[in-house]
Image (tube, rainbow, N blue to C red):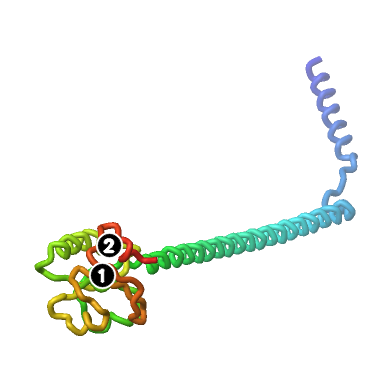
Amino acid sequence: MTRRYILLALAGVTLVACDFTGVDLPDIQNAPVDSTRMEDKDGMMRENEDMMHDDESMMSDDEGMMMEKNDDTMMEKEDDKMMEGDHMGDETDNTEEPKAMEKEGQYQAYREGVIGNGMESVLFFHASWCPYCKTHDGNLNAWYPGANLVNVYKIDYDTASDLKSRFGVVQQDTFIRIDGQGNVIETVSFPTEAQLKAIVTAQ
């Protein structure tokens, strides 16, 4: 019995082996290639490359626009600075003009050339022994230098014979206002403080 089972088993293995050897297996090497799928892959690769080129072009355009915007912004800032500089220059000019107009008047000793120099002024015939002259001399020293005041020139009454003769001065403590050509505008002797302030004030 045992030998019979062994023979039967061997016979079954042989049949199975014969069945497998009779089966036709596919030839993988000689299998036909699907050309349609290959073409689809090539097309997709080309589309991807085209999309990459388009993205690069768009990025270049964006960079160009950003650079143009930056240039425009810098130009606008420079224009603003130039305009601010112009305004500052105008303000400086406007502030300098009033300073020139508000030149302070001076109280000083008489000297040649101040008569007829194109500017109004006052001639003060002063005597050192005159109490009124001393009072007015103190007032003038307190007011000068000062804005809106004409120049006052102090003349020694005792020694200025030519000037006294020229302007008809016959007493000390006399004030004579003259124009830019040396012509007499006003004369006052022994003035009050208010009269003195009026004759030396610019008009």
Report x, y in % for residue 57: 72, 61
Report x, y in % for residue 90: 49, 65
Report x, y in % for residue 103: 34, 67
Residue 126 is left or right of residue 199, and the answer is left
Front-most of 181 and 104? 181
Judging from the image, what secondary structure is the residue with disc 2 in?
helix
Q: Which residue is mark 1?
A: 175
Mark positioned earlier in the residue sequence (1 or 2): 1
Residue 180 placement: quadrant: bottom left
Residue 198 placement: quadrant: bottom left
Q: Which dot marks residue 196?
A: 2
Considering every residue shown, the one lying at the far top of the view is: 1
- Crowding around mark 1 (Cα neighbors within 10 Å: few <14, some 14 to 19, many 20+) is many
Q: Quadrant of the N terminus?
A: top right
Could you give the CA–CA distance between mark 1 and mark 2, rounded to whole angstroms?
Answer: 8 Å
Front-most of 180 and 79? 180
Q: Is residue 63 above or below residue 159?
A: above
Identify which amino acid the numbered label 1 is placed on. Phe
Identify which amino acid the numbered label 2 is placed on. Leu
